[in-house]
Image: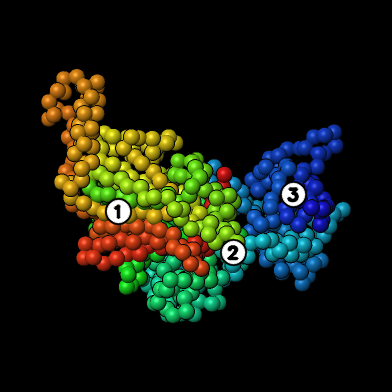
Amino acid sequence: MGSNLLTSFLQVKKRRFVVSLSSAQLQWNEVPTKGGERGDHRAIGDEAEGLSGTVVPLEEVVAVKTQVKGNGEAKDACYALSAPSQCEAFTVYHIERQPGKRWALQHVTFCSDDDGVPCHRWIQTLNKHVAMQDNVRPQRLLVFINPVGGRCRGEEIYRRHVDPIFKLAGIDTDIVVTQQANHAKDYILNNNIEAFDGILSVGGDGTFSEIMHGVIEKAQDHVGEMKDQLKPANLRLGIIPAGSTDCVCFTTMGTNDPVTAALHVVIGDNQPLDVCEVRTDEAFLTFTVTLLGYGFYGDMLRDSENHRWLGASRYDIFGFKTFLRGASYTGRVDFRLATADETGPRDGKLCRSGCDVCKEAGERLHSQSCKQALQPNDDEWMSVCGQFTAINLSTMSCSCARCPSGLSPSAHLAGGSADLVLVRACSRSALLRFLIRHTAQQDRFDFPFVETYRVSEVRFTPIAKKDCDECEEEEEDRIASSSELCRRVLPQATAPGLCCCHSFPQTLAASSWNCDGEILMQTALNVRWMLSRGPVYKHRLLLDIRDHTVLDRWVRPRLIRLFARGIEA
């Protein structure tokens, strides 16, 4: 960690510690009293809990405050610099990791020792080297609060959990409470935001998506015009979870805890994120960063859209309703695999902080000598035809509190690829087992009716059941397997009407698309995901709609940056 910049004795509640500061960390160890005894730890109090042998990286120091003689009130560190002789103690506020990927704000107060380095010198050196860390910390933030998102607790969450931390860290904030849909986006597009170091979303995934649209469009040469080559957003985005699922926050931090999210913002974490662009052949439609789902998740979202007031429970209620209906959709899925190696949705390579897969994708993106490495391979198209309960295309794992490992656990935040999950039509009991697996640690794809691929191109074409030669054979196999299951479990169920697994739901004509928790009104007939050639590397997704409109969905690598670092291992 390098040689020590400062080392001296300091006191905590009248107990002596050896405190050392290097260019990367602060460390303190308790000095044994005479006879080798350390004394009564209860005299230290709660703030000294776990002090012995404590090491804090400087990048995780949130703030340094000082106390002056004759005044027990904590002051900013810079206050003591003008009167160093008055400085008698200083408090270091730092991050402490807790179970469940959560971070907490802890503090320890050091008092000057007669034989030690003066406190004002500690404060000066600490602040200097905290500022020299790699992460660029924000000084001023634009904060958008959605007062009606989730359980309508956005303002309360910000005031109680986030605002005190920002004040402690000396971050100035301009707060805007949104009044209607697209308020945040319109504000960003119509006002000068160059004075800010980042924009904070206090709400759910919908609020984040609205802000993301605004900053990406703002970064282009002409507002409202989306060209083939998009400029990356200039400002980092922060997320304070206050929504129903908080998928983006959970996937990038491993928790939906607002204190953890605020601390990521304070220390200036920086996580690149791929963004998918959805457009027609004539006009831009939307951006997505999580899931494009057809079938089960599209139906569930469509049915629950008018019941957002239920909060997160709407997904339970209408998810159960969608499960009971169990609709399936007939179609053909054509695709090309993204890579020629063995990587894929079931490779077990989880996207974590410092992910090697994302690093390699970033290196390929920025290496002129490896341009062709990002092009899709020349493999023949693969084709799968049948009835599908769900077709999911994930650009990140899509984790949330209800599904901690996500819909596709091995998808990557900045890997430049997408995970295609095909869930064929199956009995309700089989579908229930598949859904339950999402809440457990077992492989949720280990079913004969589930297929997974890491793709560079994919095309989905709904077709009539009578035109699918594989569908009739597929249904006969399902009936046979389900009847065999029921004979083992319920021998008396010899008639189809007595067999719960034998009854399959009706195959419907078309579903809806779930696009980052919002309904894509057009009903897709053809989905195509391909890596376009040219100076800007992007995946492209084409959707042919019933009215023959063509939609493009392009993955824009690292188009935005978040105040996050990925889920820590």
* Front: mark 3 or 1: 1
In the image, 540 versus 212, the foreground residue is 540
Q: Is residue 140 above or below residue 94?
A: below
Crowd band around label 2 with a 10 angstrom C-alpha radius: few (<14), some (14–19), many (20+): few
Crowd band around label 3 with a 10 angstrom C-alpha radius: few (<14), some (14–19), many (20+): some
Instruction: Locate the C terminus by quadrant.
Output: top right
Q: Name the outermost residue toward the right.
A: 115
Q: Position of residue 420 (x, y in %)?
A: 38, 49
Q: Position of residue 116 (x, y in %)?
A: 84, 54
Mark 1: secondary structure: strand
Q: Which residue is mark 2?
A: 368
Q: Is residue 235 visible?
A: yes
Q: CA distance from mark 1 to mark 2?
A: 33 Å
Mark 3: secondary structure: strand
* Front: mark 1 or 2: 2
- How many numbered marks, from 0 up? 3
Amino acid on which disc 1 is placed: Phe
In the image, 101 versus 410, the foreground residue is 410
**For residue 526, side relative to residue 418 (left or right):** left
Crowd band around label 1 with a 10 angstrom C-alpha radius: few (<14), some (14–19), many (20+): many
Q: Which residue is mark 1?
A: 460
| Residue at image point 33% right, 72% down | 283
- Disc assigned to residue 339: none
Q: Which residue is mark 3?
A: 27
The reply to whether dot 3 and dot 2 touch (C-beta < 8 Å) is no
In the image, 152 versus 502, the foreground residue is 502
Q: Position of residue 428 (x, y in %)?
A: 24, 36
Q: Position of residue 297 (x, y in %)?
A: 30, 50
Amino acid on which disc 2 is placed: Gln
Q: CA distance from mark 3 to mark 1?
A: 57 Å
| Residue at image point 72% right, 53% down | 25
